[in-house]
């Protein structure tokens, strides 16, 4: 019989992160958001809680937990703020996970302890200015020269790439031509501060304003040959597998945002009065909030199911795409409804609901657009 109740250890983790989000993040994140400032001190506290090491082995400084533990933590953070949630998601599933999954033992020993502790952050350089969803159209190149990779090109929309804590970016680059004439794409680790790598200014974004997102450019950027992550020519396949996992985490973030919309709407409907009584006594508002809860609860089951299959070692790509597609659209729907419940106050940037509305849209775009998810689902079903 299916049982999606959290075990005692995971429930304790959930409560701990929920308390941290309410007591530490909620009181101050609005200021960081409006200043478009990365909350370094909050992120360090997240590291002190062990959140960045949740799914990694203890031998590398991790907590020895599971990817599902990470998702639960991300959901609880996103109930309060998505900027800190995406900082954790990207730092772990996109930054540290490629080193853990595909890196050499030397790379793991060098990078993972600091990444697990939150003392350092890593980024994932896949998207390019002219690529977007077509990640296979990579133009960044890396050629071997005198025992070094010489990297040239640019990457766009890279999360955690320019913070005070950033120490590593793993980039995909064309390293040759395959036997069939296609591009040979490999992954290469580039430490922050390497000559030839330029970190652009922070983007001015619609949402996620307290997270760090930048463009990176490489001009004859040289790193040792040993900086190759995984097998030469397997970079594209490696990162597709990383994205499959990451979609479950993004789904958890979307569920957190959707649930946060419910939390705020329930609170507001009980205190805001109109025509002499709380608006929560109006059936139209009750139904709106009830529908929001139905959507959030159903989306949660979708990412739980995807995580379950992943942890069992079963194919989970379709379930991950379903969870990511559905939960991101639920987040948008709930943000819209919560703004309506709040009326004029929902349109104010300083309110949580105002931030939720601004943060929700990117969930239908990042780590695979909704259109890409539908393509993947259809392909897995044998359609087309």
Image (cartoon, rainbow, N blue to C red):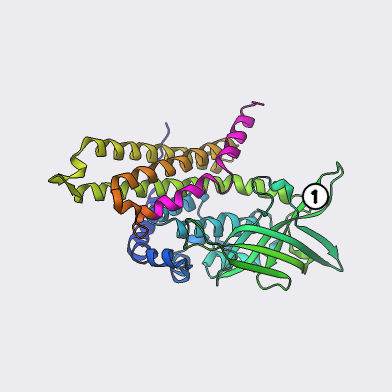
Q: Is residue 368 visible?
A: yes
Secondary structure mostly taken by the magenta-highlighted segment of the chain: helix
Residue at 86 percent across and 66 percent down: it is 145
Task: Give yes or no for residue 2 being in the magenta stretch.
Answer: no
Q: In this rendering, is residue 71 above or below 52?
A: above
Q: Position of residue 223 (x, y in %)?
A: 76, 68
**The quarter of the displayed image where residue 91 is located:** bottom right
* Residues packed near mark 1 inside 10 Å, few (<14), some (14 to 19) or many (20 plus): many
**The quarter of the displayed image where residue 290 is located:** top left
Q: Position of residue 212 (x, y in %)?
A: 53, 63
Q: Position of residue 50 (x, y in %)?
A: 47, 63
Residue at 52 percent across and 36 percent down: it is 322
- Tell whether 307 sits left or right of 78: right
In magenta, the rendered stretch is 355-384
Q: Name the quadrant of the C terminus.
A: top right
Q: Is residue 316 visible?
A: no
Compare residues 108 and 367 and report the one nearer the observer. Answer: 367
- Tell whether 228 sits left or right of 304: right
Q: In this rendering, is residue 40 above or below 265?
A: below
- Please name the residue that numbered disc 1 is placed on: 184
Q: Position of residue 174 (x, y in %)?
A: 78, 54
């Amino acid at each position: 019989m299916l049982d999606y109740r959290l075990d005692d250890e995971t429930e304790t983790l959930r409560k701990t992160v929920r308390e941290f989000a309410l007591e530490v993040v909620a009181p101050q994140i609005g200021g960081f958001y409006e200043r478009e400032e990365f909350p370094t001190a909050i992120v360090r506290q997240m590291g002190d809680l062990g959140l960045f090491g949740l799914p990694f082995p203890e031998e590398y400084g991790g907590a020895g937990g599971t990817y599902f533990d990470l998702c639960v933590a991300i959901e609880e953070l996103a109930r309060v703020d998505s900027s800190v949630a995406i900082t954790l998601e990207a730092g772990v599933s996109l930054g540290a996970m490629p080193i853990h999954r595909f890196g050499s033992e030397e790379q793991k020993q060098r990078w993972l302890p600091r990444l697990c502790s939150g003392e350092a952050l890593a980024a994932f350089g896949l998207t390019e200015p002219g690529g977007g969803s077509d990640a296979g159209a990579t133009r960044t190149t890396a050629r071997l020269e005198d025992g070094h990779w010489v990297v040239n090109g640019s990457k766009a929309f890279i999360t955690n790439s320019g913070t005070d804590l950033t120490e590593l970016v793993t980039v995909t680059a064309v390293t040759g031509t395959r036997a069939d004439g296609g591009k040979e794409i490999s992954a290469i680790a580039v430490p922050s501060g390497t000559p030839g790598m330029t970190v652009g200014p922070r983007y001015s974004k619609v949402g996620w304003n307290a997270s760090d997102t930048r463009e990176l450019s490489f001009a004859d950027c040289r790193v040792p040959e040993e900086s190759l992550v995984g097998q030469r020519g397997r970079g594209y396949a490696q990162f597709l597998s990383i994205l499959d996992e990451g979609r479950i985490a993004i789904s958890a973030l979307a569920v957190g945002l959707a649930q946060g919309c419910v939390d705020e709407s329930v609170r507001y409907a009980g205190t805001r009065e109109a025509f002499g009584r709380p608006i929560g006594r109006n059936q139209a508002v009750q139904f709106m909030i009830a529908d929001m809860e139905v959507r959030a609860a159903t989306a949660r089951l979708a990412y739980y199911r995807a995580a379950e299959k992943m942890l069992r070692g079963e194919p989970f790509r379709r379930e991950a795409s379903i969870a990511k597609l559905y939960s991101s659209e639920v987040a948008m729907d709930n943000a819209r409804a919560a703004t309506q419940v709040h009326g004029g106050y929902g349109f104010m940037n300083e309110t949580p609901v105002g931030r939720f509305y601004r943060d929700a849209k990117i969930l239908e775009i990042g780590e695979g657009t909704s259109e890409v998810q539908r393509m993947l689902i259809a392909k897995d079903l044998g359609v087309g």
